[in-house]
Image (cartoon, rainbow, N blue to C red):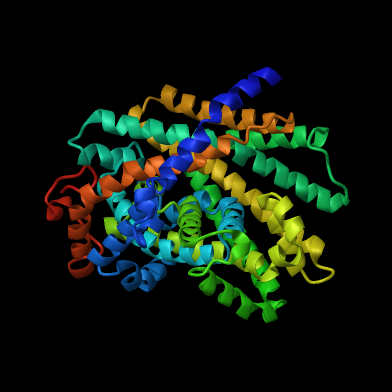
Amino acid sequence: MDSLFAAVNSVLSFVVPVSDFFWDFPKMFSFWRNIPLLGEFSLAVIVLVGSGIYFTTRLRGIQIRQFLPELHQLTVKSQVKTGISPLAAFFLSTAMRVGPGNIIGVTGAIAAGGPGALFWMWISAFFGMATAYTECTLAQLFKEKRGDEFVGGLPFYARRLCGDKVWVGVFLSFVYIFYAMMCLPAQGFNVVSSMGAIAGIITGETIPVQSMFYYVVSVMVIFLVTVMAFGGIRRIVSVSNKMVPVMAMIYVLTVVTLIASNTDSIPYFFHSVFVGAFSPEAVFGGAFGIVLMQGVKRGLMSNEAGQGTITMPAAAAEAKHPCEQGMVSAIGVFLDTHVICTMTGFIIIMAHRWASEPELWSSLGTYPKFLLSLGAMTPFGLNTLVMMLISLCFCLFAYTCVIGFITFSEISANRISSKKSFIYSVRLFAVFVAAFGIFCHIAGYDLSNLWAFSDLGNIIIVYCNIPMLYLGFRYVRKATEHYLHVDKNHFESECIGLETDCWKK
């Protein structure tokens, strides 16, 4: 068995340099690096941030103009006959976005690029809100009705925008499913390991990974994942509606409490973020390009703006107007990055452990760095309670990511075939992959190279999705004009110059 996993890892080892190539291109060439200012940016940064700036400009800052009205609209209850409500779609997409990456990703970005990386996460997310609006409006425009549900997203609007070529939708569906399957093992084990951490806090003892407790918990997690997977989108929506507000509020309130008990460090936080954004501290060994790259790269992994994945829950909503769901998705980016990720940033930066304990800091992994910072921020006597709450949040973050990957894989699978046998096969395979990853980690096998698939999958989907947004942007602009100046409560696709399945007369 050891030789099998060694062979798997050796095959997967090529993923790391390939992922780095796509993220860093063309910065590995001296001619590019020698270009003043522009040479600091990789193509990935230019595409992501540049597209966000373009959409923000062309839509005249719609993420600002419509933020408060649409935020209010989210609080209004609505009855739906088909699909799910806009609020339910918001919670479903948030369940996927608010994951361990909000803790691990932010910690890793700050550790590699310094406090300034958080600033660039804010900037990229602000412009990413316009990108999210664009892609999710497209998802609504080109969604399709299957029974009592709506399905759609990148594979669906890409097919229509590329001349209704079937192979385009099928290819992009397979790309997403493959990416999701590579992310499931690590996220599945995150659920189990966080439950082990909670048990360890309660008992006061470290529970060995290779123990009966971990095996029993793993079986329970796999059972819960299976129940959710085979319950369909509506069951997952019902659960996410309850879990997302709870886990977000627990995390935010816990961190706000820690900030309130360390108010003397708040000025240091803002000073470090804004100064570090343009003058990275030498201790991080970074230049401006590294700081910006970390902010954009980890911001994408967290809020997924421009990636095309958040388009799937957006398409599932029964909205009054396509742009309504576009703005709901933009608000989701704000919640994920400007609220949840910022909370993690406060913990890491205010604790300042890289300076006070440099040797210990450099020797720790990403999540232990977060725990070290968390411990430094926690008032005496509250360590147990805080660790319990954060571990619970991490567990819920990871679990919602697992069911999110499975749900979005199912939606993508509908672009390939709607046959129940095929959909059930995708669900079953997803559960198997999650279980395989969990038990491999418990058995002690190192599958760390699978993490590289996440970075690689992110940027590949971005390069597939962004061109589609430019192809369909003319329809988004026409729909936006209708939304702002004609009627927010009624829409027919003929007003944008084409006929779509769910918005025709």
Q: In which quadrant of the rendered view does residue 443 lie?
A: top right
Q: Is residue 214 visible?
A: yes
Q: Is residue 496 above or below residue 162?
A: below
- Please state which of residues 132 and 361 is positioned toward the viewer in this rendering: 361
In the image, is 206 to the left or to the right of 48? right
Instruction: Identify the residue at image location x=60%, y=35%.
Output: 185
Name which residue lies at 75% across and 57% down. Answer: 359
In depth, the one of 463 and 338 nearer the eye is 463
Q: Give the left or right position of residue 2, taking residue 495 as reference.
A: right
Residue placed at 22% from the left, 39% from the top? Answer: 160
Q: Where residue 327 sits: x, y (%)? A: 35, 62
Residue 293: % across, % down: 46, 55
Tell which residue pokes out farthest to the right in this image. 204
Q: Is residue 157 left or right of residue 303?
A: left
Q: How many marks?
A: 0
The structure residue drawn at horizontal position 50% and vertical position 37%, both measured from the top left corner, is 17
Viewer-nearest residue: 191 or 461: 461
The x and y percentages for residue 83 are 38, 46
Residue 80 seen in this snapshot: no
Q: Is residue 152 left or right of residue 248?
A: left
Residue 244 point in image, percent of width and height: 56, 56
The quarter of the rendered structure image containing the N terminus is top right
